[in-house]
Image (cartoon, rainbow, N blue to C red):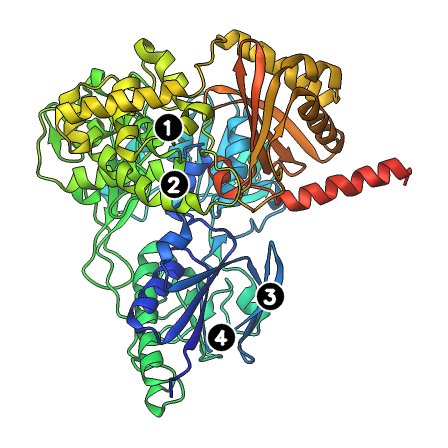
Amino acid sequence: MSTPKKRVLVIGAGYAGATVAVRLAGRARGRAEVTVVNPRPRFVNRLRLHHVAIGRAVPAPDLRRMLGAGVTLVEGHVTTLDPDAGRAMVAGADGARTLAFDRVVVATGSSTAAAPVPGGELVHAVGDLESAHRLRRAFAALPAGTPVSVVGGGFTGLETVAELAETRPDVTVRLVTAGEAGGWFTPAAAEHVRRTLEGLGVEALGGTRVRAVASDRLVLEDGAEVPSGLTVWCGGFAAPPLARDAGIAVDDRGAILTDGALRSLSHPAVLAVGDAGHTPAPDGERFSMSCQFAFPSAAHAADALAGDVLIGFDCPAADGAVDDRPLDLGFTARCVSLVPAARRAAADHRDRRGPRARRDRAGGRAGQAGPGPGHRRGDRPRAAPARGDPLAARRPAGPGGPVGRRVGAVTRTEEFTALRPLLFAIAYRILGSVSEAEDAVQETWLRYESSATEPASVKSYLSAVVTRLSIDVLRSARVRRESYVGPWFPEPLLTDPYEDPERSAELADSVSMAALLLLERLSPRERAVFVLREVFAFDFPEIASAVGRSEAACRQLAVRARRHMEEGRPRFAADRREREELAARFFDAFADGDLDGLRELLAPDVQAVSDSGGKGPALARPVVGSENVARLVGGFAALMPGVVDMAPRTINDQPGAILRDRDGKIVAIIALDVLEGRIQTIRTVINPDKLEHLGPVADAWKVRADAIARRHRRDSGA
């Protein structure tokens, strides 16, 4: 007689939640049903939310692929947790459902605590993805000269103020902190922080607290006022209210009170990992909220649960956990990323044991991380420097010495940073996915940074690595795309990070939606060869090294790929100005519901096609013909007023627009193909998974229902 599987529910799929789920599924030997509840299908790299705030694309890997086949992912929010009954109520896009469990791991993390001062509702934060996106929009819209204040001098405050100051030197950035900026470092490290902030033009206002926030100023505790057109609050973190609402014992910040084995003091069937738990350290203090605690606490909890599962929850030996030893953790380093334009440097704390690290400063490779997204060790990077800047300047090292292994006159970090736009451009054209391209670029950095190879041509070497990685990813992606619901489009790209004036036409043509869809006809190797040769003009010896074939074979692959591409649609003959003028007329007619104006602009055989992946309202089949498409667009325009706003944008170097709901969340993007003075194709991407890298995404189903209800009320005169 088989033993029923034990049901383990993990709430949250951040660093801690994803780790505990994967580790438990692997160690439970098939005897546990591991279910993860997370509000979105993609992983959020919380360490890089300050990069989101400055508008840098941060990869969001697919969670199902990360978690693997042994873990079930449920998209939604846990609205009610009943640890005594072993039930959780989950609200998702498809409605509410109840999940039963034998054990529950709370891994909900934390976010920036509400500012406890009058006017606190006016501040921005970077403690969660939605807050970072809101800050990004507000920061990007600031007029030059606007004073910006960052309140809080901890790790988050220091990293955020450095990123904001470097990204927009045209605004005035101030750091307001109760102590001195970096004062909790050793004198040498504090001086490093001071010099770095000073070099970025940050005014450090230490030894004071904020008493109130207004829309244009801060009021300090001594009554003094300082101008602030945008305030970012980084003054502490708090856990979500889920555990408190469930009757679980929590501390004053909402973190679950646990024993040393991470088990709730009030409910032994509940474990808390990462920031969700208040876990005592061996020295009597609590482990600090940090990603450094998330991973080991998750591994410890997973091992304890695996023991529970294998012996049995009801076995006397498993009274709470087989392994009730308290977590004993030593931090070897805590890194803070302060990255001036002239170089990359890291100040960190080092210690041999205990939750609080010794206050030392470290430079060099130990404190350095890759210049791309998704780092797995060390410091975290800044956004890439301005185009045309990195390598030609051959900058000398700044104070504190160079960081990273050196290649000739520059470090590996600087070499990679300069080539990163090219690597992303190659990967995106091979994969058609922003997130997968970012992952490939980051994996390229990790391999390069850990390799002893000193290539004769760094460009050729890194291009070969990213190409091979992209080919491997594309092979597995092809299988997933075969089961995709409805038409599949590439993930939209607003700005191509790579520029080459001598090949601007090839670059623009190859990144369009139409070209990327034509590339789908090619095999992975044909696609890679075509991209390297036709778009980026690599020589065949370089291409042969990149794809693992002889030069002769690569020439044949190039001929076949070129023939397949030429058999598709012709290149778009309209120049940029003509496309933009036509698109402007189209979107004006769209907004006005002008059917006659729309018919004038549409080709006789125009098509309207949408990609929702089954996750949003979409056309059941392509709509063909100018009359049919004009009526479709006109009908949609009639639903938009008061519900959806449309902002024209360049999408994949072609005319397009972003549709947002009343809260500013993205509903869809529209991309236009223009040929011979007419619009040939209208493509709409509604799949939220393909829009998340652009900002917060709306529930398109709800937006559609609201629009229909609003029109009914308008038509009925209600």
What x and y, as percent, mark residue 356? Answer: 29, 59
Q: CA distance from mark 2 to mark 1?
A: 23 Å
> At numbered mark 2, what does the secondary structure look like: helix, strand or loop?
loop
At label 4, the amino acid type is Phe
Residue 528: image location, x then y, percent: 27, 29
Considering every residue shown, the one lying at the far bottom of the view is 316
**Labelled pair 1, 3 in contact (Cβ < 8 Å):** no
Quarter holding residue 521: top left
Left or right relative to 188: residue 109: right
Q: CA distance from mark 1 to mark 3?
A: 41 Å
Q: Amino acid at mark 2?
A: Pro
Residue under circle 4?
A: 101
Residue for badge 2: 59
Q: CA distance from mark 3 to mark 2?
A: 30 Å
Q: Which residue is mark 3?
A: 97
State which mark lies toward you, 1 or 4. Answer: 1
Label 3 sits on a secondary structure element that is strand
Q: Earlier in the sequence, mark 2 or mark 1?
A: 2
Q: Is residue 411 visible?
A: no
**Which tag, 3 or 2, sits closer to the chain's start?**
2
Residue bearing the label numbered 1:
519
Q: Earlier in the sequence, mark 1 or mark 4?
A: 4
Quarter of the C terminus within the rendering: top right
**Vertical placement of 60 versus 685: above or below?**
below
Question: How far from the left and from the top, in percent, is residue 508?
Answer: 40, 17
Is residue 214 visible in the rendered image? The answer is yes
User: Mark 3: which amino acid?
Assistant: Arg
